[in-house]
Every structure is written in structure tokens, then in C-alpha cells.
Amino acid sequence: MRIGVPREIKALEGRVGLIPSACAELVRAGHEVFIETSAGAKSGYPDEAFVAVGAEIVADAAAVYGRGEMIVKVKEPVEGDLAHLRAEHLLFCYLHLAALPELTRRLCEIGCTAVAFETVEDERGRLPLLAPMSDIAGRLSMQVATQLLHQPQGGKGILLGGVPAAKRGKAVILGGGVAGSNAAIIAAGLGAEVIVFDMDRDKLVAARAIGPNVTGLYPHSADVAQAVADADVVIGSVLVTGERAPHVVTEEMVRAMQPGSVVADISVDQGGCIETTRPTTWTDPTYVTHGVVHFTVTNMPGAVPRTSSQALSAAIAPYAMRLAAGDWEEVPSLKKGVNVAGGQVVHPALLK
């Protein structure tokens, strides 16, 4: 198969769909790989690194899409990408279509087959292609939130972990999955008082195991409201596979927070689990609502593209290999990843 890897064009997105070592495996298997020039530059992979493993560098996106049968990228296609997509393309990337009805409509109009990283599901119900970026987004969201608490950044002027003779800060994390648990690890390591809310008791047990300063609670509305009102940092990491994220924190809960507190909503890709969330980019990553600083970038891992590209490529390479081999439609994990095909929405969560 001919596989195309375009340069990402979303604002300040530096990741690349396949790093050279993953391209090498595809080339060894007999596939052709076309990389848009400079696609890996921000991840630390110059064009020469791809050429060295047998990939071909092409001049622009038109050449990548023109020669590729399968398109492997990171983020959902934006206008510059959509202009090149054709019905015969197999698109393999993050899509998050539940929060993007216009993109869903455009992909249906184009008629391509679109397999979303975030809905590929293994036999144990895990999301193996979402997990590596959830690892990073969870950690990064808390790192950024601690800085946004600084007074020069508009925060309330506290050190999240506190010091002797000063109070510890309080972090509330909505969702104890991969992203939420990683956020909790960072907050706990800094010394904050941490509460993780989740409906799954096993995740609450895992949260408590992070450290003695971490509490796991069931998300009763009254308990969430009280914890959010007392929090210095609130991290949103609620996920329902393929569906729009439910609002766990209402606007009234945000209004009750102290001025200079911070909200970071990792769920923003799926619409956000905090009612005051709206998508931002790394060009202008924050805004203030009801005195609370909001960090809601839709491609948080794009800020660390070398780490992200390595982790993502390791996860998606085996699936890209299976897609390229053909006859993949009955592979259960990949079948669950198909969001649109033949001009129709096919994923059950999107059909809702």
C-alpha cells in the first residue's frame, strides 16, 4: 500500500504521524511511505532520517494525498487537509467527531473511510491509541495548571504543593482513567491535596494507591460541587468512548470557585466535561470566565512533539501495518475504530 504522512497544520502542532523507525517497518513489509517535507522537523526528525529508512520525501500536501492510499496523521483534518482528501482514501488519525459535526458532515460528503485513533478498542475494552496521548495530556495539564496559579499568569498566587508554614493547594480531578491518573500523579508528587472523582471503584482504589494525599470519591453532585468550590486546580478528564463528554461541572460550580483558580479540561476534544469549556489553541491557550483561568487547548500533547510522536507512533504502528495489509474490516479493534465510511456515519456513539 502507498502510505502518506502529511505535515500537521493545526496551530503550533509539532507531532508527526509516523516517526522514521515506524516507517522503516512499513517499508520492510513492502509498503511505500511518502512524507511531506519537514513533517517531522518539530519532533526532531529531519527529512534525511526518513530517507535513510526508505521513505520518500515529497514537496507538499497535494503530493502526499495524491500518491497516498492511506493517510496517517495526528490531528483531525482541517480545511487545508480536507481540500486534498478523496473518497478512495483511508484516513487514520484522531478525529473526535462527537464534538465536530461540521467535520463529520464534510467527511461524509467526501466519502472516505475514516478510522479514529480514539475509538480503536482492544478485546479488554481499552483504548490503546488514545492512551499514550492521555498519559501526556494528564501530566501536561497539571504542569501547566501549576504555572497558571502563579500571580503573573493571572492565578491566585500559590505554590500548589505548599511549603512548611504554608497551606498545601487543592487539586480536583474529574475522571480516574489514564489522563486523570497521570494528572493525579503529578499533583500528588508536588504535595497537593488531591481528590479524584470516578464511578469505577477500581479506579478509586488505584487513585488512593498513588499516595496518602490522594482521595478517591464517587462523583455525587453535591460532593463534586463542594470540592470544586474549594479547589485551586480542577482537571477535567471524563471520557465516554466516541461520545460527547457529559458536563460534570456546571457553570454555577465554576462561578463558586475562588478568583485566580485554574480549570484545565482535557476532555475539550470531546466537547469538554466542564460547562464553561470552549476550545483554544497553543497560540492563545487560556481565557478567564467568572475569574477562573481556563486552559482548554485541543491538542495539549502537541506542545511536546518529540515525546508525543515517539509514544504515539509506537502505539499506532502495528495498527497501521494491519490496515496497510488489507482485509482489515473484520478485525474487531479496527472495526470499532471506523467512524465514517461510504458517506455515512457508522460508529454507534456518533449515531446517537
Image: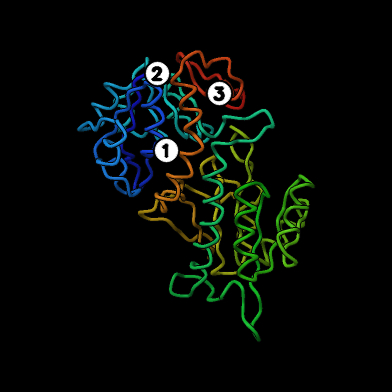
In the image, what residue type sits under mark 2?
A: Glu
Mark 1, residue position? 75
Q: Nearer the viewer, mark 1 or mark 3?
A: 3
Q: Earlier in the sequence, mark 2 or mark 1?
A: 1
Q: State which quarter of the image contains the C terminus.
A: top right
Which sits in the foreground, 307 or 134?
307
Residue 44 left/right relative to 337: left
Task: Give the farthest residue toward the left.
Answer: 59
Mark 2, residue position? 109
Kind of element beneath mark 1: loop
Residue 50 left/right relative to 102: left
Spot occupied by residue 163 in the image (x, y as percentages of width and height): 62, 81
Mark 3, residue position? 334
Q: Quadrant of residue 78?
A: top left
Which sits in the foreground, 77 or 29?
29
Spot occupied by residue 274 in the image (x, y as percentages of width and height): 59, 50
Kind of element beneath mark 2: helix
Q: Earlier in the sequence, mark 1 or mark 3?
A: 1
Q: CA distance from mark 2 to mark 1?
A: 19 Å
